[in-house]
Image: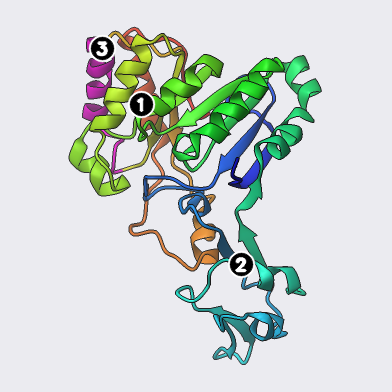
Amino acid sequence: MEEIRVTNIQKYSIHDGNGIRTTVFFKGCPLRCQWCHNPETQGYSPQLMFYKERCIGCGNCERFCQRHAVRIVENDAGIRLAETDRHKCIGCGECSDICLANARELCGKSYTVRELFRELKKDTAFYETSGGGVTLSGGEVLSMNMDFIETLAHMLYDNGISVYIDTSGAVPYENIQRILPYTEIFLYDIKSMSESVHKAYTGVSNEHILENLIRLNKEKGRIWLRIPIIAGVNDDLNNIEEIIVFLKNNFIRPEHIHLLPYHTVGIDKYERLEELPREKMLVPKEQTLEALKDIFEKAGFDHVYIGG
């Protein structure tokens, strides 16, 4: 079975489900959310992250790059820095291996299913004592090789380890069906009920995402609804009211609803990837979040939270 790329295995996580969890961030996603705080998980291929504040201009990267994608330049202050031609770079990682200052980091480590399972199984004691487990996230975990993901989830399930799936829902429904027997909870996103807004800010329509949520609910999947809240994009009362109507019309009763306020923690990652967000996103006001939470509760929904 082929290997799959992972950008991070985050241990002792308390924001991706019950108890102490280990969250696996798989590399690759069909969406391009403009507020994404993990842009290194969007592409499926390895990517180089450059920490220019660490660079000492030694020139090792320039000398060792076989594709001549790196050169040392001198800025206006006379400081030597590495500059990467992203069109030539193939993410081989050789420059990061020989970087003396750890200024270059390759995102996307490859694992076989057994290697990844062994790593996740190390924390079994924490799962057992806290009621936690493993959360498979991304990127979009269900856009990966599903033979790999199904096998991994099956192995975890057979070893008594709780599996949560964090998904955008922008995947073929058969991928969800394959993982359903081994999944305790689906952390399922709704970003906007407006198809035009959804497409403008994520690059894809929300139609298939909503259809998948309806089907998952009909098949008795346990759902925690997660709604990223971005000021000026989807923090209006109308969007929340439309979500409530959609849930009620389709008899969907999420066990939890999490309003996830946009934050700027991941902004520096765009610079390290030498990319920029297409549009500046804004943090929602606390009173707005409280008002949205209140609307859900008045509509009869329990376990509504601000944050993960």
Tell me if residue 8 is in the magenta stretch. Answer: no
Residue hosting label 1: 173
Name of the residue lying farthest toward the front: 1
Disc 1 from disc 3: Cα separation: 17 Å
Determine which of the numbered discs, if any, sits on residue 250 in the image.
Answer: 3
Is residue 294 or residue 71 the one in the foreground? 71
Residue at 34% in and 7% down: 300
- Give the quarter of the figure containing the N terminus: top right
* Left or right position of 236 against 10: left
Position of residue 204 measured from the top left corner of the image (x, y, whole percent): 27, 43
Query: Which residues lie in the magenta part?
Result: 232-250
Determine which of the numbered discs, if any, sits on residue 92 in the image.
Answer: 2
- Mark 1, secondary structure of its residue: helix
- Mark 1 Cα-neighbour bin, 10 Å: few <14, some 14–19, many ≥20: some
Is residue 186 or residue 198 the one in the foreground? 186
| Image depth: mark 1 or mark 3 in front | 1
Residue at 34% in and 59% down: 278
Prevailing secondary structure class for the magenta stretch in the rendered image: helix
